[in-house]
Image (cartoon, coloured by chain):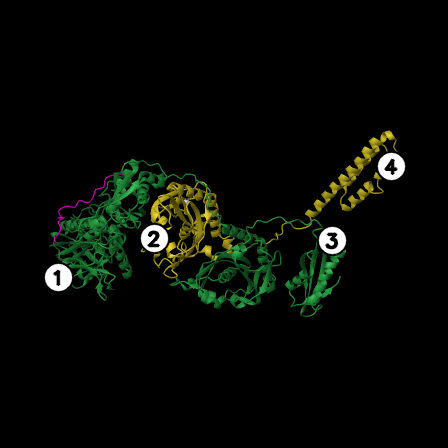
Chain colours: A green, B yellow
Amino acid sequence: MRIPLSWLNEFIALAESPREIADRLTFSGTEVEGIETVGSTFSGFIVAEVRAVEKHPNADKLSICRVFDGQAELQVVCGAPNVTAGGRYPFAPVGVTLPDGSLTIKKAKIRGVESLGMLCAADELGLSSDHSGLLVLDSTWPAGTPLSEVLGPPDTVFELEVTPNRADCLSAVGIARELAAVYRTPLAQPNIAGVSEAREEQAPWVRVEDAVGCPRYTARLLENVTVGPSPDWMKQRLERSGIRAINNIVDITNYVMLELGQPLHAFDRDLLEEGRVVIRRAKAGEKMRTLDEQERELDPSILVIADASRPVAVAGVMGGAGSEIRPETRMVLLESATFDSALVRATARKLGLSTESSYRFERGVDIELAERASRRAAQLMVELAGARVVGGVADTRPAGAALRRIAARYSFVRDVMGIAIGDAEIRAILNSLEIQVVEQGGDGFEAVIPSFRADLEREVDLVEEVARIHGLDKIPAPLPRSTVDPQAAANQTTRAKAVLRTVLAGLGVSEILNYSLVSDAALDLFDPGNRDQRAPIPRPLSADQSVLRISLAPQMVETLGRNRAHQIEQASLYELGRTYSRGATGVTETESLCIGLLGPIGRTGLDRRRTVTAEEMFLWAKGLVESLARAVELPPLTVRPTAVAYAEAGASVELLAGDTALGTLALVDRRIRKEWRLSDPVAIAELRVAPLLANVLSVRTYSDIPAYPSVARDVAMIVADSVTHEEIIRVMREAAPPELETIELFDIFKGAAIGAGRRSIAYSLVYRSAQRTLTDDEANGYHESVKGALRAKLSAELREG
Amino acid sequence: MNNAEIQELQAAAIQEVGAAPDAASLESARVKYLGRNGRVQDVLLALRQAPVEQKRELGRLANEFKTSVQAAVDARKDALQASASVASFDVTLPGRWHGLGTRHPVTQIIDRAVEIFGQLGFTVADGPDIETTFHNFDALNTPANHPSRDPKDTFYLDDTHLLRTHTSPVQIRVMQSRKPPVRIIAPGRCYRRDTTDATHSANFHQVEGLYVDRKVSLADLKGDLTYFARQMMGPDVKIRFRPHFFPFTEPSVEYDFSCHVCHGAGCRVCKHSGWIEISGAGMVDPHVFKAVGYDSSEVTGYAFGMGVERIAMILLGVPDIRMLYDNDVRFLGQF
Ligand SMILES: [Zn+2]
């Protein structure tokens, strides 16, 4: 909302600077979003009378004017379409500089015709952006009058952001009331006189059929109206407030709305069939052309003002084109009503129409205001449009309701604010907001709430009033009163996740974050088979963000691909986030971990250029996951071949820690990698976070450090390629006594010397007893049984020596 | 050998050992003096042949001969080894160890916030991303017609489920499950139907705090947020409240931090105002307490929120929120 400071000054005397006033408004709850200086001293500008207009001989769109400046007639070339003989316009004589400093007027020849000055449009005066024609001045101004007398001194316009609970602040008087409270100075209300408050006992020309949608409707009749332009001071105020001036009657309704906060509407009564209004729901199929020249389809959810046969206005939103004020309007029906805020909101939304009127009704307009605002508008119509008020006011509201009273305690105000503010100060602040305080003895009081403050309902609402007027800057910032919360279960998951992140950082893996919403196409690329489990977003913002992610892998591969496009050769990344899958009982959210590897990430030193093989990449990823598992205290990992939808054939496994399935590890299929031009292997591990966190915080207990020396024995063998490392380990473990402490792979060799389909593989085994030093004979005995088992169960050819 | 001869020999040995140019000549010098057939045997012979009354003094000298020459040998050996190792490889070659991983800036800010509020006795609470309209709106006193409920602004999954628009529903879940006092902090992902641009993201993170106890006041809120601001942004950061309106708090405020870059003088970061808008806060509205079964005549409480991405952008100087979700390792590696 825009309000000129000069308007506020009509109700409250403020000597402070605009900046200071704006700050006080912001810090008492009405945010000033902008401060604009408008107008100027208009030094040198005068009112000029155009005495004659003729066409420019060399230019169609220009005219040659004879301009009287109060003393002499001058020749001026003008391009404005609205220049007419007899009109009064702002004039900049030769030597005058425009307010924005952009131009100093010189004697000039325009298309061969001499011009001695410039007739000005509003934008050239810095008044608005309007360049449609010359600014038309009231014809009563004598030529030669300094323009500053006409347009007044420079002004300041505040751009205000009013919070939705403060409908009472959507007016000049409302803002002035706030300032009166802040500065503790008296507030003057507009002086309304000369119009009778008497009610029409019988007013059959107003009928409300929906009293819920329209709890109050007032109407006055004004005859003998002369429709014409408003006086300059009113046009200027409206324009500075962001409302276009139209004619005196419409301008007055807008002016009073801005002044008092009550939206009003003026009908040409002669265009109302049978001269009456009915406030009713629209009928199905009814249509109406609104003032913006749009044909509107109405329905029974919409409240309208109708005449005897057809809707003439959408209640609280916009008038109809068929009953508007015309130049020839003689009799006005002035509406000042209260409409239900939810109804107006729903209608405005349905019609896609937001107006100054609907904006105010949606927030709630004080029901007690309707008649007073009508009287104020009638007074202005009498003064400015020669109108005569016919009879009294038709008013459908029986009588004013009792004011709300809130029981409150001074001590509560102090406690919630956390500040020692005295009873008298609290009382003074409430009084300054027109809230009466009735003492109840001791700590208690009763606050009588004015009708325009529907937002004040509870004791705590009064605290806010005191706090914001007293000043939030006066609230201290004491040291925290840190106490132990005995019920607080320390959040183990958060701690455990922090450990997990630290471990991953230590392993050289960097964290990324991707959006939770992805495209179906991206998920399809990785696994078209999980469509049924995906949770779609109805009415997505875009196809790219149309479904909740069921896997972190697609975005991880995309991230790796995007980095590769930036010439990043290697990356090891992880994301810790939720995945979402839809089942019979709804959508399940699962904390997931995805690790992605790209490039020669497992190599150090000078060996980075060599092509990364699939085996290398897989084993790096596996080694990384194994280290992670060890760091979070899981039992040693085993793998089980499994098909992962996006994996290269044969390069995907399920990862198990003991019996617990952790997730999968896979090399991404070439077909998918091609989407991001990733020609080298990409490893993706997808893990459930819950089992990773299970042991993170477990307390580790001491076990004895070996007291006796160990004995090492090697075994080298040739086995078929089909015999896996895990199988060999299992066979050795089964054959050996508990004294077999560790088995370590130290060599693998394939080649012509061994023969196709076979490999040489060698392990170092360490034996140790916890009770005594093992003899060579004992160790040899254990080792022989291991060898025997390898021969018998795996057909291993043992290489002696 | 007499006493003086032994001492002369000792001095000569130490001098020779100390001058040995390399390991081989050092070894031959050692053998010459201390070896099985070395000069030490002469000393020991003299000791054996000496009269009883001289044995004590000669024994001391013999012992000193052996230990001092051996010490000289050891010292020279260390010196030779030390000079040998410096010369043997290029110490300026790049080091070889796998790199350290980095944490995402958003997570870093969350962890820091959790840590700071942890010092004030706050514990972390968590809730689902997919919330009910009850927890996200109704219980938070958000009227049916409030603009935040508009499907234009909120991702609805169906009539009663949505992607949470803030982490405030976590506060409701905690209060429903516990009696006061409550002191929690709720970090998490939130969703709004914002078109992504430099400062908006449909997907963002919030940290919200809630403190409910007897006589919790606006001053407590200001004090605790000031503590947080100083820990997070810098030791002299100040906090400022502006009155505002939220359905779930009364009184409601917006809070600003004084600019940590220019200390209030005005700079580009604070748009020359000296202050940086952070987020909203206030005293928990009695309607919210009613919705969770708390007695607002017994307790009061404060609640606050903050956008994690916003803090990250302000503190780390990140110019565009989208950079936080681009996951460019050249960006991530900076933090
Ligand atoms: Zn600054």
Q: Which residue is mark 2?
A: B142
Q: Which mark is residue A212?
A: none
Residue placed furthest toward the top? B53
Q: Is residue A799 on the magenta stretch?
A: no
Is the residue indicated by label 2 positioned so its CB lies within 8 Å of ligand 1?
no
Rendered residue at 85%/37% (across/down): B44
Mark 2, Cα crowd under 10 Å, few <14 / some 14-19 / many 20+, is some
Quarter, ligand 1: top left
Is the residue indicated by label 4 positioned so its CB lies within 8 Å of ligand 1?
no
Q: What is the spatial separation of the Cα atoms under label 2 and label 3, in whole angstroms?
A: 76 Å
Rendered image quadrant of residue B189: bottom left
Q: What is the spatial separation of the Cα atoms under label 4 and label 1, in whole angstroms?
A: 150 Å
Q: Which residue is mark 4?
A: B45
Residue type at mark 1: give it.
Answer: Glu
Where is residue B289? Give x, y as percent: 36, 48
User: Residue B272, can we see it?
Assistant: no
Whether marks 3 and 1 lie on the same chain: yes
Helix, strand or loop under label 2: loop
Marks 3 and 1 in Cβ contact (< 8 Å):
no
Residue type at mark 3: give it.
Answer: Leu
**What chain does mark 1 sit on?**
A
